Amino acid sequence: MSAADAPRMQARRKVIDAIADTMDLYGATHSFGQLYGVMYFEDRPMTLEEMKTHMNMSKSNMSYAVRSLLESRMVTKLEEKRERQDLYRAETDFFQAFRNFFTVKLQREVDVMRGAIEEAIPELTETILARETTDDERALALQDLHKLRDGLRYYEWLQQFVARLEAGEFFETPR
């Protein structure tokens, strides 16, 4: 790196650190955020070996980081290979990266919570209808049932939100 590159690299480092800090806010580890930041600025396909060298991480940690970024669709695995090694590229459009990251995370929440609520509702209903259930227990189960039905309405709304977010309805990307 030449002296002329130093200010540019310092500016990059500030943004990479900020990306890592903000991704940490959303449940991704700091190092995953740094890796995304490095790949963002490289703006070219990278192999795991190149990432490992850049990040000074073990190959297993690097594989885990890349897998996590792939799952959140912040990074894509390319069809082509370089010297028989897989190539990965970061999503460099922040609008698209936002949509990718949050649709994955929110969809996971919807799936987990709706599954649990839809499993719990029939169980509560059986408890409410059972002859052997005490009046106090029936009243508590009915309270829980109302809470879960409200929760289900929320997750139905959130599912619609996720679909609309994924479709890009909430913002136009300024150019």
Image: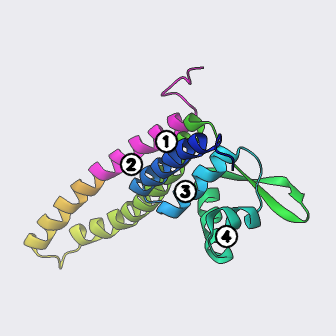
Which stretch appears magenta?
Answer: 150-175
Q: Earlier in the sequence, mark 3 or mark 4?
A: 3
Question: CA gap, disc 3 to disc 4?
Answer: 14 Å
Where is mark 2, residue-wise? 155
Where is mark 3, residue-wise? 34
Predominant SS of the magenta segment: helix
Where is mark 4, residue-wise? 63
Judging from the image, what secondary structure is the residue with disc 4 in?
helix
Kindly report which numbered mark, 2 or 4, lies closer to the viewer in this rendering.
Answer: 4
Tell me the crowding category of disc 4: few under 14, some 14 to 19, or many 20 or more residues within 10 angstroms, Cα based.
some
Judging from the image, what secondary structure is the residue with disc 1 in?
helix
Find out whether the residues at labels 3 and 2 contact each other: C-beta distance under 8 Å.
Answer: no
Kindly report which numbered mark, 1 or 2, lies closer to the viewer in this rendering.
Answer: 1
Tell me the crowding category of disc 1: few under 14, some 14 to 19, or many 20 or more residues within 10 angstroms, Cα based.
many
Kindly report which numbered mark, 3 or 2, lies closer to the viewer in this rendering.
Answer: 3
Question: CA gap, disc 1 to disc 2?
Answer: 10 Å
Question: CA gap, disc 3 to disc 2?
Answer: 32 Å
Indicate the amino acid at tag 4: Ser
